Image (cartoon, rainbow, N blue to C red):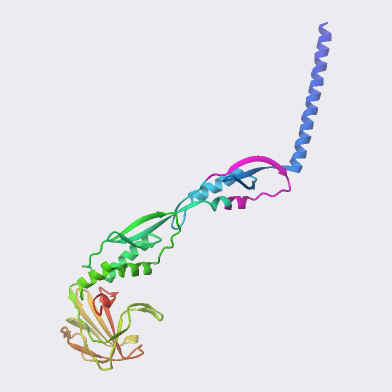
Amino acid sequence: MNFILSKKIKYYTKESLRWIGLIVFGLLIIALVIWIKYKPVYSVTFLGKEIGMVTNKNEIENTLQEYTETTYGDIAFITLKELPEYELKFVESGEKTNEEEVLLAVKNTAIVTYRRYAITLAGTQKAIVSTKEEAQNVVDEIKKEFNQDLELDLKIIELYDSNDIVPETVEVAVAKVNEDEIVQTKLKEQGATVNGITLSAPITGTITSRFGGRRSGYHTGLDIAASTGTPIAVAASGTVTYAGNRGTYGKLVIVSHGNGVETYYAHCNEIYVTTGQNVESGEIISAVGSTGNSTGPHLHLEVRVNGEIKNPQNYLYK
């Protein structure tokens, strides 16, 4: 009896294993057919809409994470409105995925927050630049323009804004602050004094070219037109440190007034002083001419403080 039972157990076990093997083989065949004809992909849904299919969802997620974490230029941070949702499905192996389009669709809805820097004057925002370095350059340039005694409430404020505000160049920002009524009032209060040296106008005439940028390049002084031979008076007492010809300046007189202040008188027709001579404010030192690089008789007047070129109209001919 036990023998018969043992044979039956062996038989059914063998049959069971055979059927299991057939089932496994069949499943492998089915899997192979599916593998050849179909491929697994992830359908991507974003903001309630299917936007495409991708092969590797982890790769998409990692790329989006890098996008939000890697900032550059004046971008402070990037925030995605929503993360995509993924659903595994099988499609025919020839069907194409569109990873690039999926990434672009998500990135296009991102909120980009910019870091900018505002220059304020007496608490009022006057200009915006891209970097802190540019903002400091603006403040430094404005301070260079004026007497060190001129006190201005200039501050640099860090801004965060999701709008793509177009920042200004340093030159434009400087000009915006300079034209403010507060600055102009301070300049009038300061008068013609620079580093404690009071200046007076060397001649009376018509201003034909101002300080700053122009088509032919940066103009380092102020041009005042007058007839040839018009007497030029020194702007303040001092010592003549140069009197003679100098390249594009033509006939040039340079006077040092102390406290680092110098004045230049260029394109002269005649020079009446010599190097090393002491002169008193208002004394005639030369005459208007058109020597050097000049298109007509005029005085090219420069003001320098500790070697730095200043706008003469900060002190004269306002």
Q: Quadrant of residue 305?
A: bottom left
Instruction: State the residue at coordinates (30%, 69%).
Output: 178
Q: Position of residue 63 (x, y in %)?
A: 55, 48
Q: Is residue 283 visible?
A: yes
Instruction: Check the picture and name the quadrant holding the N terminus.
Output: top right
Instruction: State the residue at coordinates (26%, 87%).
Output: 205
Viewer-closest of 129 and 36: 129
Instruction: State the residue at coordinates (80%, 28%).
Output: 22
| 271 up-or-down from 15: above or below | below
Viewer-closest of 20 and 276: 20
Q: Is residue 194 visible?
A: no
Magenta range is: 82-104
How many marks the image carries: the answer is: 0
| 191 up-or-down from 25: above or below | below
Q: Is residue 83 magenta?
A: yes
| 316 up-or-down from 161: above or below | below
Q: Quadrant of residue 203?
A: bottom left
Viewer-closest of 122 and 131: 122
Viewer-closest of 56 and 97: 97
Instruction: Check the picture and name the quadrant holding the C terminus.
Output: bottom left
What is the residue that sits farthest to the front in this orientation?
48
| 98 up-or-down from 314: above or below | above
Q: Position of residue 300 (x, y in %)?
A: 30, 84
Q: Position of residue 179 (x, y in %)?
A: 31, 70
Q: Is residue 24 magenta?
A: no
Q: Report the side of 32 relative to 314 (left or right).
A: right
Q: Position of residue 55 (x, y in %)?
A: 65, 45
Q: Report the side of 266 relative to 45 (left or right).
A: left
